[in-house]
Amino acid sequence: MRRLPISADSGVKRSVIFPKNIQIFNVPEFQRQVSQLFDPLNINIEFRVTRQNRLEMRWSFPQEAIQYNHSKCSR
């Protein structure tokens, strides 16, 4: 997963690019099902096709859902 910039308004964003050998035959239906799955958690899911013709799934987490424990990170 690669990190996208963090902004104060939108919280944290993450991105997953599916391998080329993964085939999703009905992308709109898959997108609808995944979005419905994460809606109760207030996580926004977006899909796009990259220049390399691969499917990318972007997750947008609201800022209030993110908790950091910096003491564990510094060890």
Image (cartoon, helix red, strand yellow):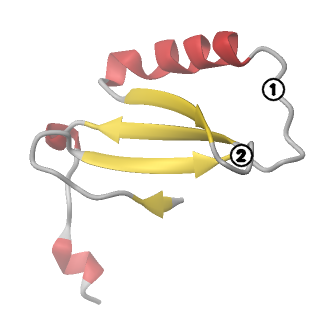
Image coordinates of residue 66 in percent, x first then y, are: 22, 48
Which residue extends farthest left? 8
Residue found at x 20% / y 67% = 69
Above or below, 61 against 2 in this view is above
Which residue extends farthest bottom? 75
Indicate which disc, 1 or 2, sits on the residue closer to the N terminus. 2
Q: Are marks 1 and 2 in contact (CB under 8 Å)?
A: yes
Tag 2 residue? 18
Give the CA separation, mark 1 to mark 2: 10 Å
How packed is label 2: few (under 14 Cα within 10 Å), some, or many (20 or more)?
A: few
* Quadrant placement of the C terminus: bottom left
Image coordinates of residue 42 in percent, x first then y, are: 29, 24
Image coordinates of residue 35 in percent, x first then y, are: 49, 18
Residue found at x 57% / y 33% = 48
Tag 1 residue? 24
Above or below, 8 against 62 in this view is below
Could you tell me which secondary element the residue under label 1 belongs to? loop
Residue found at x 35% / y 16% = 40
Seen from the viewer's position, the closer of residues 59 and 37 is: 59
